[in-house]
C-alpha cells in the first residue's frame, strides 16, 4: 500500500519554486488558473495511485 | 563643500595636510583605495600586511553611525582572523544558531545552524557594523606600528579620475583645496552608490525591488532568546513582514516591511515608529531608540569588476538585498580574493591577467548571492497575485507538513562560495576525497590539538600533506609554496580526516593564499605540484 509522501522530496527546492513562479510570469489570472489546472492533472497522472491522490486531495483541503 | 554626508560613530582619522598636497607634480602610489568602509579598510590591511604600500582616501574622518550590517558569517570571520582581527569581533559579537519563522501568530518553521564542532568560528555572529569596522581599523593601527605601509587620509574626496592605461590620476578635494594623486592601481570600495563607478560611466545591471523596509534598532531589557525571528504577515500588523534579531549591548534589530507607496518622512517620525513597535512589543515594554532608517534595495552587479587599472570590490561592484547576510560578507571574500592576486602582480611575480580571475571568481560569487537573495526577496515580498497565492500556500502547508518547509524562504544565509569549474582550478585527483574540500572550495577549519587548522593556512601558498610525503617547499618564479605536514592522528576528534581525507589514505592539497583549494592529490608528484602552482597564479 502506497502512502502520500509528505517529507521533503525535491532537490533544489528554491530552484523549483523559482521556476514555478517564473512559469506564471506575464499570465493573466485566468491564464494562471488554467496553467495550474493543467499542471495538477499532469502531476496527478504521474502519481497514478488513486489512494495517494485521495490523500493529496485531503492535504490540500486542509480542513480546520 | 566637503560636508559630511552622514554622522560619525567614531572619528578616527581627522584630516591632516600632507606633503603630497604641496608638490608641483602628483605623487604616484602603487595602490590607492577609494572609500574607507569595511571593504576598503580590509583591502588596505590585506595589502599592507603583504608590505605593499597602500593609500586609503576617504571623504569622511571615521566610521559612519548606524548599525547597518549586523550578521557576519563564519567565512567572513575567518578572513578577518587571517588579518588578525577576527577574535576581537567574536569576543564582542553575539553568537546565534536558531531561527524561527512565523506566519501570522503561528510558528511554521524552525532552523538550527547546528554548528559543527571543531571550528574556531561559529556559523554567524551579530555585531553592529561600526564595531566590525573599528576592529579592522584598530588592526591597521597595530600593523602600521609593525611597519605595514598603510596610510589613511580623512576628508579626501575623489572628485574625478582619469585613466592613462598603466596608471590613473585622481582629483582629490580636501579642506585645504584640491590636489592630484596618481595610482598604479585604484581599488573602488566606495559603496553601493559608488561615485567611482559613475565617473567611469559604468552602470549597475539588475533588479530594483519595489518595497521599503524600516529598521528600528532599539535598546531594551527583553527576555527574547538570542534567535532570529521572522514573521510573514505578523498578527501585530506592524508591517507585511517583521524581523527581530539580537545585537551586542542589549540592542535589538527590528525590521518592518512597509510596502512601496509610503511617505518616508512620515514613517520615520518617532511617533510612527513607536506605534509600530508598540503593536509588536506591547505598551509596557520600555526601550530606547538607537538608530532608524528606511531602505530599499537592488539585486545587481557591474558587468565587469576590473576595468584596466581600476578594480571594484564590495557593494561598489555588486549589491544584494539584506536577506541572507550576503553584502558585507561577500565583500570580505572579494578582499580575500583580490589581495594576494594584486600583491603578486605588483611584485611582478604573476601576469596582470591573474586579476581577470578576480572578476571571474567574484562575479561568480556575486551571481550566486544575487540569485539567493532575489529568491528570498520574491518569497518575502511577492509581487503578483499568483506568487502570493503560492507563497501563502507554502506557509499554510508548512504548519503541518514537512515537505513544504524547504520552500519557506526568509533568507538563505551566506555560505562561502566554491569556485567550481573556474580557470585557476588545478587537478582534483583525490579518489574518495570529501566533496566539501574539493578544488575551488574554501578550506573547512579543523581542530589541531588546542589549535585550529585555518590559522596555519593562508597569506601565501601552502602544501598541506596528510600522511603523505612532499618537498618542504616548491618555488615558481619567486612564488613559494611551503609545506604543512600533518597526520590524521594530529586530530583525535577525527574531523581533520573527515574533512580532508574522506575515504582516502593520504592527501596532498595545494592551498591558495586565500585558503581556497587550488589542487589536490592522494600522493605528491612534484612536477604536477609545480604545474598546479603555476596554473593557480595565472601563468599559463
Image (cartoon, coloured by chain):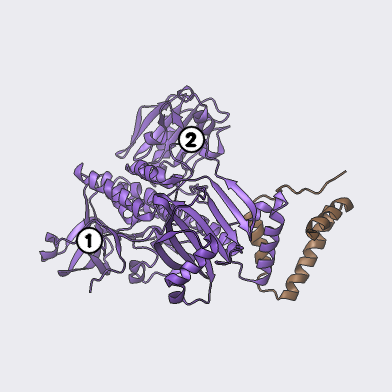
> How far across and down, in percent of the image, does residue B299 sit?
49, 64
Front residue (pair B154, B148):
B154
- Judge from the rendering whether residue B496 lies leftward or rightward of residue B184; answer left or right: right
- The residue most toward the top is B489
> How far across and down, in percent of the image, does residue B254 sit?
48, 60
Front residue (pair B61, B443):
B61
> How far across and down, in percent of the image, does residue B50 sit?
27, 44
- Judge from the rendering whether residue B362 lies leftward or rightward of residue B176; answer left or right: right
Label whose residue precedes the other's in the sequence (2 or 1): 1
Q: Which residue is mark 2?
A: B520
Q: Which residue is mark 1?
A: B154
* Residue B379 sits in quarter: bottom right
Residue at image coords 57%, 63%: B241
Q: Are marks 2 and 1 in contact (CB under 8 Å)?
A: no
Q: Colour of chain B?
A: purple
> How far across and down, in percent of the image, does residue B364 sit?
49, 55
Alpha-carbon span between mark 2 and mark 1: 45 Å
Amino acid at each position: 500500500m502506497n502512502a502520500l509522501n509528505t517529507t521533503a522530496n525535491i532537490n533544489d527546492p528554491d530552484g523549483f519554486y523559482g521556476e514555478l513562479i517564473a512559469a506564471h510570469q506575464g499570465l493573466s489570472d485566468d491564464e494562471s488558473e488554467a496553467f495550474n489546472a493543467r499542471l495538477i492533472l499532469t502531476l496527478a497522472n504521474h502519481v497514478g495511485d488513486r489512494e495517494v491522490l485521495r490523500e493529496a486531495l485531503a492535504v490540500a483541503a486542509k480542513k480546520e | 563643500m566637503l560636508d559630511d554626508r552622514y554622522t560619525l560613530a567614531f572619528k578616527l582619522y581627522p584630516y591632516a595636510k600632507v606633503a603630497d598636497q604641496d608638490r608641483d607634480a602628483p605623487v604616484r602610489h602603487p595602490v590607492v583605495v577609494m572609500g574607507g568602509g569595511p571593504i576598503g579598510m580590509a583591502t588596505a590591511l590585506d595589502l599592507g600586511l603583504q608590505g605593499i604600500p597602500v593609500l586609503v582616501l576617504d571623504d569622511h574622518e571615521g566610521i559612519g553611525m548606524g548599525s547597518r550590517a549586523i550578521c557576519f558569517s563564519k567565512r567572513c570571520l575567518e578572513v578577518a582572523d587571517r588579518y588578525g582581527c577576527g577574535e576581537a569581533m567574536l569576543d564582542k559579537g553575539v553568537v546565534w544558531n536558531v531561527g524561527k519563522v512565523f506566519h501570522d501568530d503561528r510558528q511554521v518553521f524552525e532552523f538550527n545552524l547546528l554548528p559543527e564542532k571543531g571550528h574556531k568560528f561559529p556559523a554567524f555572529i551579530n555585531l553592529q557594523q561600526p564595531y566590525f569596522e573599528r576592529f579592522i581599523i584598530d588592526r591597521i593601527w597595530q600593523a602600521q606600528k609593525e611597519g605595514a605601509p598603510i596610510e589613511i587620509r580623512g576628508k579626501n574626496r575623489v572628485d574625478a579620475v582619469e585613466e592613462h592605461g598603466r596608471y590613473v590620476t585622481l582629483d582629490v578635494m580636501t579642506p585645504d583645496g584640491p590636489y592630484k594623486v596618481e595610482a598604479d592601481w585604484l581599488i573602488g570600495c566606495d559603496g553601493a552608490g559608488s561615485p567611482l563607478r559613475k565617473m567611469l560611466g559604468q552602470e549597475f545591471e539588475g533588479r530594483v525591488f519595489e518595497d521599503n523596509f524600516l529598521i528600528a534598532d532599539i535598546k531594551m531589557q527583553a527576555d527574547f532568546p538570542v534567535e532570529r525571528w521572522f514573521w510573514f504577515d505578523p498578527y501585530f500588523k506592524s508591517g507585511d513582514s517583521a524581523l527581530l534579531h539580537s545585537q551586542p549591548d542589549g540592542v535589538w534589530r527590528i525590521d518592518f516591511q512597509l510596502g512601496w507607496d509610503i511617505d518616508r518622512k512620515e514613517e520615520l517620525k518617532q511617533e510612527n515608529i513607536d506605534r509600530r513597535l508598540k503593536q509588536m512589543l506591547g505598551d509596557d515594554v520600555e526601550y530606547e531608540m538607537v538608530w532608524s532608517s528606511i531602505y530599499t534595495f537592488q539585486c545587481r552587479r557591474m558587468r565587469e569588476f576590473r576595468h584596466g587599472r581600476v578594480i571594484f570590490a564590495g557593494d561598489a561592484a555588486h549589491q544584494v538585498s539584506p536577506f541572507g547576510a550576503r553584502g558585507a560578507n561577500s565583500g570580505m571574500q572579494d578582499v580575500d580574493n583580490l589581495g594576494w592576486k594584486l600583491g603578486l602582480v605588483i611584485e611582478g611575480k604573476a601576469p596582470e591577467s591573474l586579476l581577470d580571475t578576480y572578476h571571474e571568481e567574484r562575479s561568480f560569487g556575486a551571481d550566486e548571492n544575487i540569485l539567493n537573495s532575489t529568491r528570498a526577496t520574491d518569497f518575502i515580498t511577492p509581487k503578483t497575485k499568483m506568487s502570493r497565492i503560492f507563497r501563502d500556500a507554502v506557509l499554510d502547508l508548512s504548519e503541518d507538513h514537512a515537505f513544504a518547509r524547504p520552500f519557506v524562504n526568509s533568507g538563505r544565509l551566506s555560505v562561502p562560495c566554491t569556485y567550481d569549474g573556474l580557470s585557476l582550478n588545478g587537478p582534483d585527483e583525490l579518489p574518495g576525497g570529501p566533496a566539501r574540500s574539493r578544488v575551488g572550495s574554501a578550506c573547512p577549519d579543523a581542530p589541531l590539538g588546542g589549535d585550529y587548522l585555518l590559522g596555519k593556512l593562508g597569506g601565501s601558498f601552502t602544501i598541506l600533506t596528510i600522511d603523505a610525503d612532499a618537498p618542504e617547499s616548491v618555488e615558481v618564479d619567486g612564488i613559494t609554496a611551503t609545506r604543512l605536514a600533518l597526520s590524521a592522528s594530529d586530530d583525535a576528534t577525527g574531523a581533520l580526516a573527515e574533512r580532508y581525507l574522506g575515504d582516502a589514505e593520504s592527501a596532498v592539497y595545494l592551498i591558495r593564499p586565500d585558503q581556497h583549494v587550488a589542487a589536490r592529490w592522494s600522493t605528491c608528484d612534484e612536477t604536477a605540484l609545480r604545474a598546479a602552482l603555476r596554473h593557480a597564479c595565472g601563468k599559463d
